[in-house]
């Protein structure tokens, strides 16, 4: 049950190719921007798309897997936990940033043999979304 206390699961797209760096002890790490979309109707009944940007952090073998199997625009299912970092900006103001430390992920675009990978549709949706 403790695993559910700080758990995040998102489906979205990579905003850039992975830039892999190494720590002093040789551990690979990659920070990537990740976009998720939400769809809602306005007062006139028109669909609006809202995009949210998240910061993902991949460590070790997950970084290697990301670099090998995903690029900008790849649709991913990611699972991880929230982490917060405090820092002081160039103006001396204390800031906080939120990141998702990825524990596992799956590319949803295609599998190794080129077959599409699909996610089961939710049966409880009220209306079809415009995609």
Image (cartoon, helix red, strand yellow):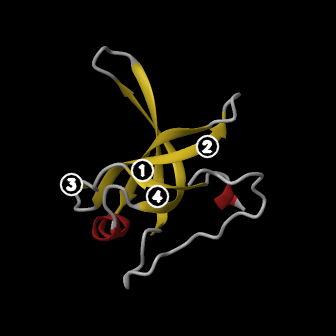
Q: Give the number of callouts.
A: 4
Sequence-first disc among 1 and 3: 3
8 left or right, relative to 117: right
Seen in the picture, residue 89 relative to 125 is either above or below; the reply is above
Residue in view at x 30 percent, y 56 percent: 29
Sequence-first disc among 4 and 2: 2
Q: Position of residue 103 (x, y in %)?
A: 48, 62
What is the distance, in whole Å, between disc 1 and disc 2 at their CAs?
A: 22 Å
Crowding at mark 2 (Cα within 10 Å: few <14, some 14-19, many 20+): few
Disc 3 designates what residue? Answer: 24
79 left or right, relative to 70: right
Disc 4 designates what residue? Answer: 102
Q: Is residue 22 visible?
A: no
Residue in view at x 47 percent, y 76 percent: 116
Disc 1 designates what residue? Answer: 56
Q: Position of residue 1 (x, y in %)?
A: 72, 62
Residue in view at x 24 percent, y 54 percent: 19
What is the distance, in whole Å, between disc 4 and disc 2 at their CAs?
A: 25 Å
What is the distance, in whole Å, between disc 4 and disc 1 at their CAs?
A: 7 Å
Sequence-first disc among 4 and 3: 3
- Say if mark 1 contacts mark 3, CB within 8 Å: no
Q: Tell me the element at label 1.
A: strand
Question: Looking at the image, is mark 4 or mark 3 nearer the viewer?
Answer: 4
- Say if mark 4 contacts mark 1, CB within 8 Å: yes
- Say if mark 4 contacts mark 2, CB within 8 Å: no
What is the distance, in whole Å, between disc 3 and disc 2 at their CAs?
A: 43 Å
């Amino acid at each position: 049950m403790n695993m559910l206390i700080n758990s995040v699961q998102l489906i979205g797209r990579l905003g850039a190719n992975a830039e892999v760096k190494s720590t002093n002890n040789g551990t690979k790490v990659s920070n990537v921007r990740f976009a998720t979309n939400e769809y809602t109707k306005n007062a006139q009944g028109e669909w609006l798309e809202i995009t949210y940007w998240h910061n993902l952090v991949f460590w070790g073998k997950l970084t290697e897997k990301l670099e090998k199997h995903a690029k900008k625009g790849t649709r991913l299912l990611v699972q991880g936990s929230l982490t917060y970092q405090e820092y002081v900006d160039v103006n001396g103001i204390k800031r906080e940033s939120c990141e998702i430390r990825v524990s596992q992920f799956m590319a949803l675009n295609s599998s190794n043999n080129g077959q599409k990978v699909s996610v089961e549709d939710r049966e409880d949706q009220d209306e079809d979304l415009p995609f």
